[in-house]
């Protein structure tokens, strides 16, 4: 656990005052797994899928849409380009991917909160993208900028969340072409955890880089990853110019990109697990190969967001066995490519933070841990298939993330862990509550919720028989009330404000 | 899927009428895993724990309480007996366990619903033991016999439940010394799925065997396992005469026993995972060794019921990382002993079937599947740390068990599963909904809930914005309303009634 040190980059009375009044916020270090991954695919199955993905790239190819420069780059790299179709000779994409690092550091303004992405690590980031928010008091409504700020504050206050995320909700009260400025400003000033950049236009990616230049210093940004941004593939097999344009900006700036097929199984990929994995692998290979053409060595993450579909209604479904199987398989494929892996999250289809939400989310969280995910977007707050950012579910999920931390530590097999002295001391028919080993170890022995109910029935009943949502509402209120902004050099604060104001003034509002 | 065939053992108009009016009930076959287990312990860790367990048996020993015959058996087998303490030479218990089968069939009166326990199988049975029941309409209350019957009916109607279980709740309106008769009668007549015998007194175990003699025929029972019963160890390291007495009856009759340490971690075992696993292994080795002394080759299951503890309140906690780690480790130890493994369940501490219940239950269900559990008691209906059998949670959990069936199938890597034709047909930018591969495969492609909400928000909202508990209440009512008793030979029905009546008349009521 790293405590907020209150270290400042600059001085100033305001910063010092903020530091003195700050509530001490505990943030767990990103997870380093000390347990193996679960391997659902055999070596033979992996080889078949890898061979098939190469066949897809070679014979079917991928489209790079509205992007003549990309086509030119592919042609120079040795691909066969016909119209917007790019057919990639067997082995070429994999070879191009080889320059991407297996693991990288994403830096943040509080170095104690830097995260390592790749290898055995697991970095947890909140929900991304919902246009709606929900809480018990206010119900479901369009998200606004103050909601966005609240979710950044909750993320900052959440012990088991390592990353502030990106579009924690869509601030629909801010013009579409100016939102990214307010969103990045919120991440930079309301939290000191790492964050993501804008991807909705190449120019907004450029703005993200420039704001980081202000926050970190231009020299620092040139040589260090300070953003990890989400580049969705337009599955099947299509790379659009908006996402590719944003990726080009980030890769050129040495910033990290997640290249992530976004697939509702049965609609954007075949209805089979092996077929979907084949397509995912082909798409990631093509996307990261292109990323590495822009700047060899730029950090890139193998992404895989896959849901299944309800064939009755066409609705995407979450926490299902097929989605878990794909997650496990994709994790194995990413590891063989020696690339960091993004997948999972506290995904659910439920409209409410109820039992369905709990089951479905836990199904995916468990698969994410054992499947070797290195970067988990949507780790908390996701509701209603990602249409809604839920206040209550944010803190419910965030609490459950503590379980992943403890599971990942594995089993302590030291002499103390073996506890033979305790078994000897207590003997048949005794009890362990007071024995020396228990006294020495009980504080860290068992993970404990900060939210769920462990009380005796009578106490719980007297206190109002509250369900999880009710407990969560209270926790949200407490966290937001305890929140204090982490100190930031006033000169930087001022420069960020000026940048945002000037950018906003430079263009008319646009709402599409 | 095996459909109820309505096959009868006898004739009679009543049975034929029942058959004609029976609702067709689908029951999934027990699970055969086509996926590997998750192995949290290294070979080195496993060897350390196995060595330590032998040390516990040799140096500390176990107590067999109020059971001189057991002490004599142990002495004859080569153990050192001192008072009630039995010290077992290194290797002896393991050697005695070797005669227990790695896998056995539990027979039931509908042969299509026989279950295989051991190897790669997973058999699912409902909650066991709660003195209370809860439903949304009636709240929490003491369980009565009609609740018991309802849970047996729900189990019979549940597609993914292979086993009718045992004490699905405690029928507190029936005298303690006569309950077992009504409970067994309910399992035998209201369901045709396999069931468990009584263990609360050796004489009640004997009654269970005699009722099975009536149901199956004495000759059949002699040579076939028709009951799997739960023998809890009085952890730490103590075997009481009630449980051992019941086990002696069952083993002698060739009936299956689960030898199961029941451990609240930190109270009945050390606060460490490795220490707890050491004690669990020592207890199971001693218990099954004793079982095999009674009748070599009697079916016996390596049981492990472990919860963690909230060190603030002393409350047992569920769905926690330590409990999952112990489950995974115990599964590895059982496999190395070549014994069937019982653990897991839809365990939770929540008072309500809410989000907490969902998260915690899913955590344990997932660990149970990947940890190699062969027999899962408490697979549905468990609430409030096992104090409560919940109607709504029964059908929620039972629905989620479908996920385990699909996950266990693993990934289809056949040519059809690879779906290369579909990827070719659709190509970049297309969609898969109408392609030939989807049309041929969509029906079985994705697991689908029978309970959860997948509807569009507007529809869901118009229909009353129902949460999972509300949907589950409706499903409970529907299943109980659709329920039709499976036909049974009237002669057997009559003989069972006579047995129960005569037994009840033979003794005064006892309520302790």
Image: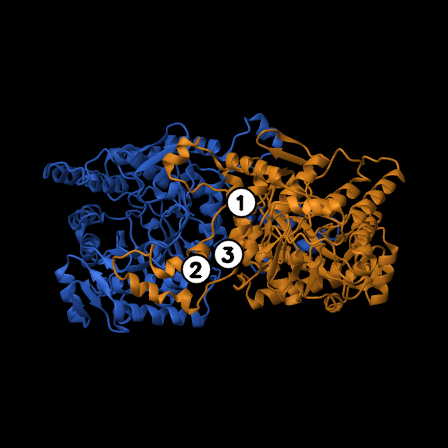
Chain colours: A orange, B blue
Residue on which the image places disc 2: B328
Query: Residue B382 is drawn in which quadrant?
Result: top left
Relative to A512, residue B326 above or below: below
Q: Residue furthest right?
A: A506
Give whichever of A159, B76 is nearer the camera: A159
Residue on which the image places disc 1: A360
Q: Residue furthest front?
A: A13
Quarter of the image that includes the N terminus of chain A: bottom right
Q: Chain of mark 2?
A: B
How far apart are the two marked residues, 3 and 2, measured between alpha carbons?
Answer: 14 Å
Give whichever of A392, B105 is nearer the camera: A392
| Badge 3 and badge 1 in a common chain | yes
Image depth: mark 3 or mark 2 in front: 3
How far apart are the two marked residues, 3 and 1, measured between alpha carbons?
Answer: 21 Å
Image depth: mark 3 or mark 1 in front: 3
Mark linked to residue B267: none
Does the CB distance between marks 3 and 1 fall below 8 Å?
no
How far apart are the two marked residues, 2 and 1, measured between alpha carbons?
Answer: 21 Å
- x, y percent for residue A377: 64, 50
Residue on which the image places disc 3: A406
Q: Specify whether residue A391 is in view.
A: yes
Q: Chain of mark 3?
A: A
Mark 2 nearby-residue class (10 Å; few <14, some 14–19, many ≥20): many
- x, y percent for residue A326: 59, 55
Q: Secondary structure at mark 1?
A: helix
């Amino acid at each position: 656990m790293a405590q907020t040190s209150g270290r400042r980059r600059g001085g100033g009375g305001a910063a010092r005052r903020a530091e003195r009044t700050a509530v001490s916020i505990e943030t767990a270090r990103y997870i380093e797994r000390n347990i193996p991954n679960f391997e659902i695919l055999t070596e033979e199955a992996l080889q078949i899928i890898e061979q098939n993905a190469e066949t897809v790239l070679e014979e079917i190819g991928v489209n790079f849409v509205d992007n003549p420069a990309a086509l030119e780059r592919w042609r120079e790299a040795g691909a066969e380009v016909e119209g917007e179709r790019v057919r990639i000779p067997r082995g070429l994409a994999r070879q191009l991917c080889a320059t991407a690092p297996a693991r990288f550091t994403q830096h943040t303004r509080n170095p104690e909160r830097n995260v390592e992405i790749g290898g055995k690590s697991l970095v947890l980031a909140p929900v991304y993208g919902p246009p709606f928010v929900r809480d018990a008091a206010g119900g479901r409504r369009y998200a606004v900028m103050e909601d966005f700020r609240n979710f950044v504050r909750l993320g900052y206050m959440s012990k088991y969340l390592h990353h502030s995320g990106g579009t924690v909700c869509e601030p629909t009260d801010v013009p579409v072409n100016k939102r990214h400025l307010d969103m990045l400003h919120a991440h930079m000033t309301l939290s000191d955890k790492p964050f993501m950049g804008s991807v909705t236009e190449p120019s907004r990616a450029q703005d993200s880089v420039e704001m980081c230049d202000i926050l970190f210093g231009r020299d620092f940004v040139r040589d260090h990853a300070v953003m990890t941004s989400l580049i969705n593939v337009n599955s099947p097999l299509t790379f659009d110019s908006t996402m590719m344009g944003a990726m080009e900006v980030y890769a050129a700036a040495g910033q990290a990109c997640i290249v992530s097929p976004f697939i509702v199984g049965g609609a954007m990929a075949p209805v089979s697990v092996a077929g979907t994995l084949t397509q995912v692998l082909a798409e990631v290979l093509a996307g990261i190969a292109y990323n590495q053409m822009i700047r060899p060595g730029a950090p890139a993450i193998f992404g895989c967001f896959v849901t299944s579909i309800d064939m009755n209604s066409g609705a995407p479904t979450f926490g299902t066995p097929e989605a878990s199987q794909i997650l496990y398989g994709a994790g194995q494929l990413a590891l063989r490519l020696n690339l960091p892996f993004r997948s999972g999250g506290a995904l659910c289809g439920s409209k409410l933070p109820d039992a369905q939400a709990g089951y479905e989310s836990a199904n995916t969280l468990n698969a994410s841990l054992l499947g070797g995910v290195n970067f988990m977007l949507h780790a908390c707050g996701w509701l209603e298939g990602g249409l809604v950012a839920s206040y209550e579910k944010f803190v419910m999920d965030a609490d459950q993330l503590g379980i992943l931390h403890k599971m990942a530590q594995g089993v302590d097999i030291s002499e103390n862990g073996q506890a033979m002295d305790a078994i000897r001391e207590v003997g048949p028919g005794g009890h362990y509550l007071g024995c020396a080993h228990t006294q020495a170890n009980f504080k860290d022995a068992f993970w404990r919720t900060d939210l769920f109910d462990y009380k005796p029935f009578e106490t719980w009943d007297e206190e109002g028989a509250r369900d999880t949502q009710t407990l969560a509402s209270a926790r949200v209120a407490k966290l937001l009330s305890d929140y204090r902004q982490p100190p930031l050099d006033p000169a930087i604060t001022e420069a960020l404000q000026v940048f945002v104001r000037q950018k906003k003034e430079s263009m008319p509002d646009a709402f599409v």
